[in-house]
Amino acid sequence: MASLTLKNINKIYPNGFVSVKDVSLHINDGDFVTFHGPSGCGKSTILRMIGGLEDITSGEMYLGDILLNDILPRDRKIAMAFQNYALYKHFNVYDNMALGLKLRNMPRNVISSRVKEAAEFLGISEILDKKIKAITDSQKQKVALGRAIVFHPKALLLDEDFAHNDEKLRAEMLHDVKKINRKLGITVLYVTNDYEEAITLATKVVFMKEGQITEVK
Ligand code: ADP
Ligand code: MG
């Protein structure tokens, strides 16, 4: 079971600012959750705490029945895709997708099959040998998603800065993310400031204001 449960989560930054206040939320395995709310309401902070990039000040967070609070980001089975994709321009597509698995000392043949499987799923098998600097933005998006799914994560986190302003690229990305959610059964948590997008995509929409959840639909 890979449901995600947040129990009375608070985040107080070192400067004393209370960014997230007593947030409780239950996300089912396979949900597509969008987070919606004005800038500064704590969306990124919540995502970063779930991903383990930010400490939780108080409260508990569970993936299934595993307490996540003290588990290192790399051991969480939660993948986060980053702004500007954070790809290594001088590496080829294969090596970008393989890097995280190599750092976890996975056997070479497992890495190879994971990368090939993800590339096929996303339709980028033909460009595995190409350097990042030689591929299109549309392909870069796919590589960034591929690099996340090779981990076989239970959940994929996407902050709003992952989405391109370009409408076509954004639509392509959302198409791929939907496919990842439906076909691979990976739970998706997606931050968007686009209300239409939030309600059309999601199985669950979380509305936030000033560090608190105001409504879950
Ligand atoms: P959102 O993603 O919804 O725009 P954030 O989660 O980034 O909001 O930020 C929530 C609040 O926490 C904002 O008021 C922001 O200024 C504040 N904040 C974010 N990071 C820090 C930090 N490192 N130190 C202090 N305050 C922060
Ligand atoms: Mg944000």
Image: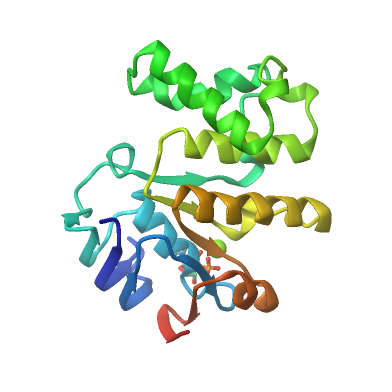
| Image x and y of residue 197, in percent | 67, 71
Viewer-side residue, 3 vs 10: 3
Dividing the picture into quadrants, the one containing residue 3 is: bottom left
Dividing the picture into quadrants, the one containing residue 119 is: top right
| Image x and y of residue 23, in percent | 32, 76
**Residue at left 29%, top 55%?**
55
Q: How many marks?
A: 0
Q: Is residue 161 above or below residue 210?
A: above
**Residue at left 22%, top 45%?**
71
| Image x and y of residue 162, in percent | 63, 51
**Residue at left 53%, top 69%?**
34
| Image x and y of residue 203, in percent | 50, 73
Q: Is residue 50 above or below residue 208?
A: above
**Residue at left 73%, top 35%?**
139
Dividing the picture into quadrants, the one containing residue 215 is: bottom left
- In the displayed structure, does residue 49 sit left or right of residue 66? right
Residue found at the very far front of the displayed protein: 183
Residue found at the very far top of the displayed protein: 108
Viewer-side residue, 64 vs 95: 64
- In the displayed structure, does residue 148 sit left or right of residue 200? left
Location of the N terminus by quadrant is bottom left
Q: How is the image coloured?
A: rainbow
- In the displayed structure, does residue 89 sit left or right of residue 136? left
